[in-house]
Image (tube, coloured by chain):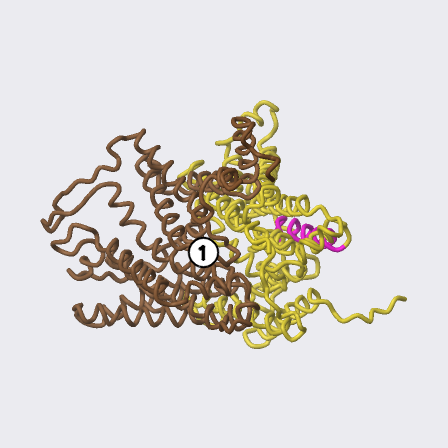
Amino acid sequence: MRKRKEPISDTMLLMSITIGIFVVLYALAMIIWGGGFLKPQMLFDMLNDNAFLIIIACSLTIVMITGSIDISVGSVTALVTMVGVMILNGSMLNGIQTALGAPDEFRIVIAAVVAILIGLAFGAVQGYLIAYLEIQPFIITLAGLFFGRGMITIISVDPQKAPQNLMDICQSRIDMPLLGSPNKKGVMIPAHIEIGVIIALVLVVLVFILLRKFRLGRNFYAVGGNMQSALMLGVNVKRTRFLAHLLSGLLAGIAGLVFMMHVGAGNATNATASEMNAIATSIIGGTLLTGGVGNVIGTFFGVLTLTTIKAIVVTSGLRDPWWQSITTGAMLCFFILLQSVVLSRRGRGGLHVPGWLKSSGRRKE
Amino acid sequence: MEKAKSKRSFVPANYSQLLIPLIAIFLLVIFNLIRDPGFFSIGIAANNNGYPVLQGNLVSILNGASELVILSMGMTLVTAASGGQDISVGALAAIAGSVFVKVLKSGAITGWSVIGGFILCCIVAMIFGAFNGTLVANFRIQPMIATLILFTCGRSVAYWINGGATPTVESPIITAIGSFIPGIPIPTPILIVIVTGIIFALIFRFTNLGLYVQTVGINQGAARLNGINSVWIKLLAFIILGACCSIAGMINVCRLSLINHETILINIEMDAILAVAIGGNSLGGGKFRMVGSVLGAYAIQMLTITLYAMKVPSTDVKAYKAIVIIILVVLGSPVVKEALSRFWNRLSRNRQPVRAGKGAE
């Protein structure tokens, strides 16, 4: 047995703080407010509503570990949702289905393929421009955000709705064994989750394995930690950054698919500001924008923490619409300060200049 | 030798960073003139109150860009000093506008209450700016993350200040600030921009702020060794940006005569950062040129107005804007620039094969 004598790494420390805070918060909520928090369905509903957020937070985590940023994920999600819904209700790409003579259910497959293709296209273009042409990621992905949002209204100005029979398949519930809560009549209602949650959880595990065990994942950390050293060590920096953005685009496309399966309607305001929520949850989960530090498990708990706070705000009677955002901001402030203090006490409180800003090519001193 | 060297670069190095915004504006002007020769004609017409005022697309471009120009001036300072961007300017402008409206609604709207409201909203915005600045300067958090806090909750704070309503303010004074002062044919927001620009020019002329900001942005450690209080300089940059936000918020409130926390200056933080980047300033901090950002802001507004003039629906504008942005930054990217200048060199060498004195080198 190998004994680990080295101190806990920054990644693990920040992640365990987040997990600890989530557990404490949820336990407190159960004790103080009880009610809904005691039912397992509450937790699963949080997952159901935020499956897409978990996925785009994963993509943000990958990109942020690489020392870059991607703020286009929210608009890619919304665009994919719109396109997917239009495929489902037959107003787009209907020819493929009729040509194959396939049943209506086949449209879901087409939607999934198109979702992945759109995501890959966004990721590839942005990744190429950022990694090989060395343009600042913020500007490129900002353009991606504008493009995605603009395309939604170009495709369709009116809100679209998916047909009910297909949505029933998409939203089919998976009952959880042994978990559930009695309703008013005393009948046991089993707790349930949607397919999207399973996809999200599988992706979290896959990304976790990728970051832990595969060379590509380790390269992400190396490039984010110090691009120069990574280059010296023989890491193909450009390709690594390109792949990070490609992966992020792919995940955003899948997130769009999951979002579509959850809401079943295309709308220009879908997933508004979700990119900032994703950044926020990544930060809460212990990922640093400077790059090189982060973990998807932390991000997953970051999403849960954020949702728990929002649920607590609603349950505790602060029903005015502004309280949710204000408490989210306050919590974000708390976590950011916590990270800053923790890292500076550990002697890493030097100047945090994000790596992607250094690569602008203008400053080569 | 000297001659050969100067021939190699397109423009003097000092002004090369203004190239991108100028090319962008130039292309847009040419495009518009081809499309509609009378696009930039300026006419004089009577407005609702019967005063003669200037009208035309050029005036509406200059007028509409006012808030963006003021914000991009402040954003340039923050970017240069801290090497990051403030994404909370829109939210901060919403807060400032709410405070302004709150003061105006507390009594009759007179000249004094407008001045008092402006001073109060300026102070509030500067306090919030100082909050952002403290997080960045003292706690050494990246600016984008630090301002994400205010970005998340700023508009809700504005909503809370308004008490969950979207109040309107009607008064001749408000109209005078938002559109025209009676007797002066130029829209007032343009005058405010000119005044703000003059104030910044005077600050840079008579103080060392510009130099200090650049020094802190380029190398914080070296700045400290030279006796510059880098924490204070960063804080100051954010406080100045706060003041800029309050001016922008006030202009927008006066222009629309109402405050809507959800829609006031929405997405302007993105445009302001874009203006700084198009202006040729490094988003990594250090050297800056405020003129570049101002030109960048006008280029963005000109693009928007051009698209509107081409009957593009306002919701679709974003997509076309994105394409133009991508083309611009690809042209300005270091790799493409290098390739272009290599290409240029080869062209000029082919033209004058004898004079390129390789022996002298």
Q: Is residue B310 above or below residue B133?
A: above
Residue position marked by numbered label 1 in the rendering: B288
Instruction: Please state which amino acid type lies under the numbered disc 1.
Output: Phe
Observer-nearest of A91 and A211: A211
Q: Is residue B222 above or below residue B287?
A: below
Q: Is residue B105 above or below residue A72?
A: below
x, y (%) of residue B175? 19, 57
User: What residue sits 55% from the left and 58% below the top?
Assistant: A279
User: Circle 1 marks a residue in which chain?
Assistant: B
Observer-nearest of A268 and B207: B207
Q: Residue furthest front?
A: B360
Q: Which residues are magenta?
A: A193-212
Does residue B209 appear left or right of residue B63 in this picture?
right
Question: Tag 1, which secondary structure?
Answer: loop
User: What residue sits 55% from the left and 27% below the top?
Assistant: B350
Question: Magenta part mainly helix, strand or loop?
Answer: helix
Does residue B233 appear left or right of residue A232 in this picture?
left
Does residue A234 appear left or right of residue A63 in this picture?
right
In the image, residue B107 lies in the stretch drawn in magenta: no
In the image, residue A205 lies in the stretch drawn in magenta: yes
x, y (%) of residue B206? 34, 66
Which chain has been coloured brown in this picture? B
x, y (%) of residue B74? 39, 60
Which chain has been coloured yellow in this picture? A
Does the image show residue A242? yes
**Which quadrant: the C terminus of chain B?**
top right
Numbered circles on residues, count: 1
Asked where in the image residue B108 lies, by quadrant, the reply is bottom left
Q: Is residue B4 above or below residue B176?
A: above
User: What residue sits 70% from the left and 56% below the top?
Assistant: A221
Does the image show residue A163? no
Observer-nearest of B302 and B285: B285
